[in-house]
Image (spheres, rainbow, N blue to C red):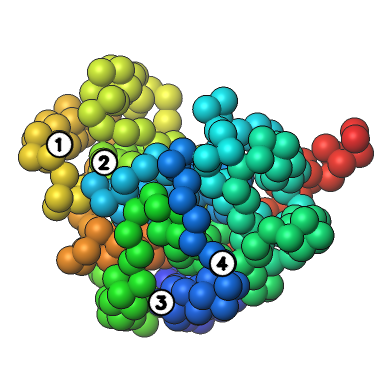
Amino acid sequence: MDALDREAIGALDSERLLDDILGLPAQLGDALWRVESAGLEAHDSPGGLVVAGMGGSAIGGDLARAALGDQASRPILAARGYGLPPWTTPDTTVLCASYSGDTEETLACYESAGALGAHRVVVTAGGQLAELARADGVGVIPVPGGFQPRAALAYLLVASLEVAALCGAGPRLAAEIDVAAGHLEKLAGEWGPDAAEDSLAKSLARSLNGTVPVIAGAGLTSALAYRWKTQINENAKLPAFYGELPELDHNEIAGWDGAAALAPFSAIFLYDCDSHPRLRTRIELTEQRIAPSARFTSVVSTRGESALERVCSLVLLGDLVSFYLAVLAGVDPTPVVALVQLKQALAERE
């Protein structure tokens, strides 16, 4: 199957995941309204912000940090696991992010933050996390139900940005969020299912099809590279990996010498125009060095004026590329059977 039109997509997209991907612009505005409606109070947290979550619920914190860039005045870090960073203190705000509200790692972090006396905020669609927070008088940012957690990114990103502003870790970006939504509307038309077959998103998906993608980021795009990797994993049900420049030039680049003998690998370098000028040089030289061992390589640039616009542009592009890869592979992009089965197995061993 190589068609990427609405007919081909409709035959596989049983739960209309594409609608959620294309709905990203509207979700940004709705997310902002939901945070404002939560009635959260500003508070000063000299210790910064920790976003505790897993998978699609955690990436919002990483992307918020990227979007704030040099405007961030305090640490903003994600905690993926059962515990908080050891430097977390009562002067730290902990945003516990779990779309389902039942993620066991995030629930453990919620309890840890409470024991430390840290300021807690919750963003969730419900579950145990919402129940605990409301019982404890902790502020809850409500997220609408019906999404796959990875498709609710706009809500987790905006929640992270707004909580960062409330705790003094960065400026408020409400105006930038509105502008980014309009920017994404245009890009959705350029890259969506009704776009030409040689559009960027469709072309990238066809070039990556049948390969093991390695996504590399640098600076602002490092978290985006991870997002692309995980979206390919979940949507297309394919192995994919990510790296970060300049670090990968000190180790991973050597491994590419043996890549061709193992599997058909491909490499995508995500570039931002505001990166250090030496990073562009590194990307060019790294791509040249590994190209003989890769089936396909490409440099993909962010689009937009503000850092938030540029972050969101590659979120949308990566989501569409991973979705199109699923269609090309003939798989339904929504179900993640492996994740569900593992959670069930863990529950049986409690």
Residue 289 pos. (x, y %): 17, 27
Q: Is residue 134 left or right of residue 318?
A: right
Q: Is residue 136 left or right of residue 121?
A: right
The disc labelled 3 sits on which kind of residue?
Pro
The Cα–Cα distance between marks 1 and 2, rounded to whole angstroms, is 9 Å
CB atoms of marks 1 and 3 within 8 Å: no
Q: Which is more foreground, mark 4 or mark 2?
A: 4
Q: Earlier in the sequence, mark 2 or mark 3?
A: 3
Residue 307 pos. (x, y %): 25, 58
The residue indicated by pointer 1 is 279
The Cα–Cα distance between marks 4 and 3, rounded to whole angstroms, is 24 Å
The Cα–Cα distance between marks 4 and 2, rounded to whole angstroms, is 31 Å
Residue that appears at 56% across and 58% down: 150
Closer to the camera, 313 or 47? 47
The disc labelled 2 sits on which kind of residue?
Gly
The residue indicated by pointer 2 is 219
The residue indicated by pointer 4 is 40
Residue that appears at 50% across and 79% down: 33
The residue indicated by pointer 3 is 25
Quadrant for residue 142, please give it: bottom right
CB atoms of marks 4 and 3 within 8 Å: no
Q: Earlier in the sequence, mark 1 or mark 3?
A: 3
The Cα–Cα distance between marks 2 and 3, rounded to whole angstroms, is 24 Å
Give the class, few, some or many, for how many residues have Cα within 10 Å of label 2's Cα (few <14, many ≥20): some
The Cα–Cα distance between marks 4 and 1, rounded to whole angstroms, is 39 Å
